[in-house]
Amino acid sequence: MFTPCPTSGGDLDLSTLRGCAIADAYARFRAAAGGSVLFAPGLDSGVARGPLDSLAIGLDWTRAPAAGDPIVERWAQWLIEKLDGAGSIYQRSDEGWRLRTGKLHEESERRLDELAGWSDTALAEQRKLLEHVDDPGDSGTELEQSLSKLAAAGWSVDSKKDKGPPTIHFAAGDLPLAVGDDWRAAGAIHPRLAAALGFFLAIVPAAERERAQPGQVAALAGRLPATAVVGPDDAAALLDIRTVAKALRDAGALDLPSGEPLGTVLERASYRLRAAAGASSPNGAVGSGGADPNDVGALIDAHGADAVRLALLHAAAPTKRFRGGDDVVGYAAAFLAQARELAASRLDGGAPGERIDSDDGLRRRLAGWCDTAVARTTENYEQLDMHRATRNVVTLLARIGDFDTAVAEDRGDVAGADREAIGVALTVLARLLAPLAPSAADALWRETGRDGSPSDADWPQARQEPATA
């Protein structure tokens, strides 16, 4: 099961689109590998969907409750009532209702070292939010400086000089639940509670949400912990999800045997292009010159949506910032063009077989390269490392080209079993490419004479021991 964190409203910049592309590629891989995949936004906050649709981001919007959805409000009111009965909420004057989260945050902090698959960045952000306030001293300038630093970081410390050491609070603070005096009033539910609840309600089919009473939806427990989450820009939103999950658990609505609602979590870094006028990529593509290099629409018009999507995944590892030139999009477009050109020049429209005839040394080497690409790319996808996945797919195309050149030089013509071998290798390439550039992979698949889409086929398996590259 796969669910990303909620996407914020407003324009979609390249950083946000990069996170969505990583999430979508992983969801496509999981589905192709035979998994039961749910890929939905946590809360439909009115985000512009045009760029998402252009880049083939396959979010299931039918699952996402809208901000202000009465069902979200009903769940939130039910949860607050349960928490109120347990004495876990309080009212702050002029600030509405809050959840006492100290024990929940202590639990989250203790469990951080046990979380498998979380990126270092995601863990660091959670630790920063959950870090205890150390005793800054009991008098004088040292205390004043420490409290000033804590306040600047958004932490809350209840202390005065004449009352001894400060009371320890968590950096994350208590979770706001509702505004105003009456949390049952229409529109009183705080957006942070609604967003976190939306994450879980997206797991439940809309019809089931409508007819079931809050706390009685088995689908929640059946889909948790989430297999993977691509983190939002705000690490606090991730902590809110974990906090609300534990509150639901303690209220008897959610079975969390491990106490943790999330599996693998990847916190992706920002992405921004700078103009690379006149700069050529290794394949001869030139940057876009004076145009805004971060204009998504202009990039798609210039290079195609698949090239933009592939560039977002290829430019850097997900946890690394990217500030390179926009020639990276031209590089991606050139790679896709090379794949199309090789297919057009060497395939005759007939569907190749499933295996490469390895009676010949050159073909045996090509088969080994395909096996290596399958093994390595599968591992890359499992680790959400889309950067290395793209590099291995690019390398496979280069190896197919090397085979084509070697056969032409050695035998004077590429025909028979050699041409068939290229067809088989290109079907492998199309399958590995499908999570990265779906439309381009579909077109390549059809060039090999096959119907449908590579996404309809089983995920490729290595035919022999991977070759040494």
Image: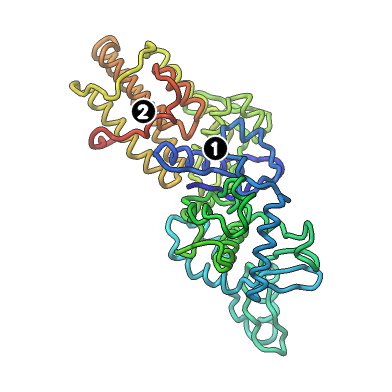
Which quarter shows the C terminus?
top left
Residue drawn at x 52%, y 50% as measured from the top left: 229
Give the residue pinned by disc 2: 428
Residue 28 in picture, x, y percent from top left: 47, 37
Q: Amino acid at mark 1?
A: Leu
Residue 319 in picture, x, y percent from top left: 51, 49
Marked residue nearer the N-terminal end (1 or 2) = 1
Q: Residue furthest left?
A: 359
Name the residue nearer the viewer: 376 or 224: 224
Residue drawn at x 40%, y 32% as measured from the top left: 432
Q: Residues within 10 Å of mark 2 (few under 14, many from 20)?
A: many
Give the residue pinned by disc 1: 312
Per the rendering, the mark at residue 25 is none
Rendered position, 89 above or below 440: below
Q: Is residue 405 left or right of residue 16?
A: left
Q: Quadrant of residue 175?
A: bottom right
Q: Are marks 1 and 2 in contact (CB under 8 Å)?
A: no
Q: Quadrant of residue 423?
A: top left
**Which scheme is used to colour this image of the protein?**
rainbow
Which-is-in-front pick, marks 1 and 2?
A: 2
Calculate the distance from the C-alpha at mark 1 to the C-alpha at mark 2.
Answer: 22 Å
Q: Amino acid at mark 2?
A: Val
Residue drawn at x 57%, y 44% as measured from the top left: 40
Residue 411 shows in this picture: yes
Name the residue nearer the viewer: 393 or 144: 393
Residue 149 shows in this picture: no
Rendered position, 266 above or below 157: above
Residue 344 in picture, x, y percent from top left: 42, 14
Q: Residues within 10 Å of mark 1 (few under 14, many from 20)?
A: many
Name the residue nearer the viewer: 156 or 162: 156
